[in-house]
Structure formats: structure tokens, C-alpha cells
Image: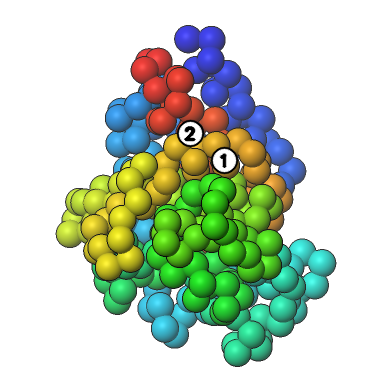
Amino acid sequence: MRVILLFLVTTTCIVTSSYSQIPSGYYSAAENLSDQSLKSALHNIIDDHEYFNYSSETRDKLKESDVDPNNGNNIILIYTRESVSGDNHSGWNREHVWAKSRGDFENKYPEHSDLHNLRASNISVNSTRINYSFDECENNCQQTFGNKYNGSALIFEPRDEDKGDVARIIFYMDVRYEGDNGELDLEMTDEIYSISSKLPRHGVRSTLLQWHTLDPVDDFERNRNNVIYSYQGNRNPFIDHPELVDYLWGDNRDNQ
């Protein structure tokens, strides 16, 4: 119980911190839970969010959520950390971190336009990543902007600065989409699937759990979470409370 009480204390600290905008009581239904009970509670908290048209609305919202904190006219691109003009639509596109082919949800709402899963991206790197699984690339790797990938192994390893961001987005998608109300049931896995597979599975889970620890939550993610909440009405729990990961998939998942 000592660790779970720490979760409650951490909740109080986060709510009262200067940069946070977590509504009071937002996560109260998830307190003192772990494993599947916790996952169900978190799903119910972040479910049924407001969603937008992918083609006509998400780009403008990303210009706000992914804004460069040092230049309000620019945005920060995932995988490269380039700062580019948000108004230059030929200079960036939208990356589905949980690849839209992993579940085949292009033009399916709310999955296709979920802002928590979309990041402004370098067009070339987005194309290179395709729908590869996220994993450590150790052999026969090619590089692009510091990211490593192996097309034969079907894996993509982001730069260290983006590994935690990617992991927490995948965690969010796993919990948000549970197959109710006609939505997909997305699940993290340690399996690596072919490029052509449409199964709603993505990973590599064990690697993503390591990346979550390697690259902790930063102020960019916190601001992005707040901006998206202002539009969608739901939050990424793993940005607000990184410790929840251990209660869902780590050593504390059996503690209740």
C-alpha cells in the first residue's frame, strides 16, 4: 500500500504545480487501482472525447499543440526536433505515431484524428518510418536525422529525445481504444507484424516501457497535453502521471 499511497501524494503535487492544468478530481476514479481495473478506469476517464475532421481541422490544432516554446510561429517536429514554420504546409505533415494501418483506421473516427496520436513531422522521416514497430535497432541499421531503422526487420528507433514521447502516445492509444462503441480495440504487443498487416496491434511493448523511463516527461509534452485537452476534453494519463505505467504493465500491476 505504501507505493499506492505515493501515487495519491504525487497526484496532489502534480495538480498544484505551476505548469499543470489537470482538473481537480480528473483521475479520482483510478485511485488505488492497478492492472486491468486501473486500465478500465482510465479508459472510462479518457473515453468519448470530442473529435475533429482530419483533413480540415487537425493541422491548425497541431500548430498550437506542437508549438516551439521559443518561437510562437514555429512548431517542433517529432523525430528531428526541427523548428519549422507552422504555416508552411509544404514543410511538414502529420505523423500517426500509432500507425493508422495498424488497425486500418484511415478515415475512421475518432481514431484517425485523435490529436494525442498525431505529431507534426518531417515529411521524409515520416515516409521512412512507414508503419514499422518501435524497437532498438542494433544490426544493419540505416540512419535519418539521428533515427535508426532496419527495413528488413521492420523496426524504427527514434532519437533518444523522442523515445519517451512515442512510448506515452502508444500507451495512451492502448488504453483509449478498447473496442467499445464501435471503436477499435488497440493493443500493444511484443510481436512485430508485416507492413501489410492490418491487425490493431503495435509495439514493441517491452522496448517502449524502457523508453518511457529513459526519456521522462518534459514541459513540451505537458503543454501539448493541456492544449489537446482544451480541444478534445481528454488527457494522456501517462504524461500527467508517468508512474501509472508501472501499475498497468510493470512490477506494481498486481498491487491493489
Q: In front: 143, or 47?
A: 143
Residue type at tag 1: His
Report x, y in % for residue 45: 38, 43
- Please tell me how many numbered marks the rendered image carries: 2
C-alpha gap between disc 2 and disc 1: 9 Å
Give the quarter of the image for residue 212: top right
Q: Residue furthest front?
A: 140
Which residue corresponds to mark 2? 245
The residue shown at (74%, 43%) is 18
Position of the C terminus, as image quadrant, is top left
Please name the colour scheme applied to the rendered image.
rainbow
Residue tagged 1: 212
Q: Residue 123, image x and y in percent?
A: 57, 79
Residue most extreme to the top? 1
Q: Amino acid at mark 2?
A: Val
Q: Position of residue 54 (x, y in %)?
A: 40, 78
Relative to 68, does residue 31 appear above or below in the rendering? above
* Residue 154, placed above or below residue 190: below
Seen at 30% across and 30% down, the residue is: 36
> Could you say which is closer to the camera, residue 61 or residue 253?
253
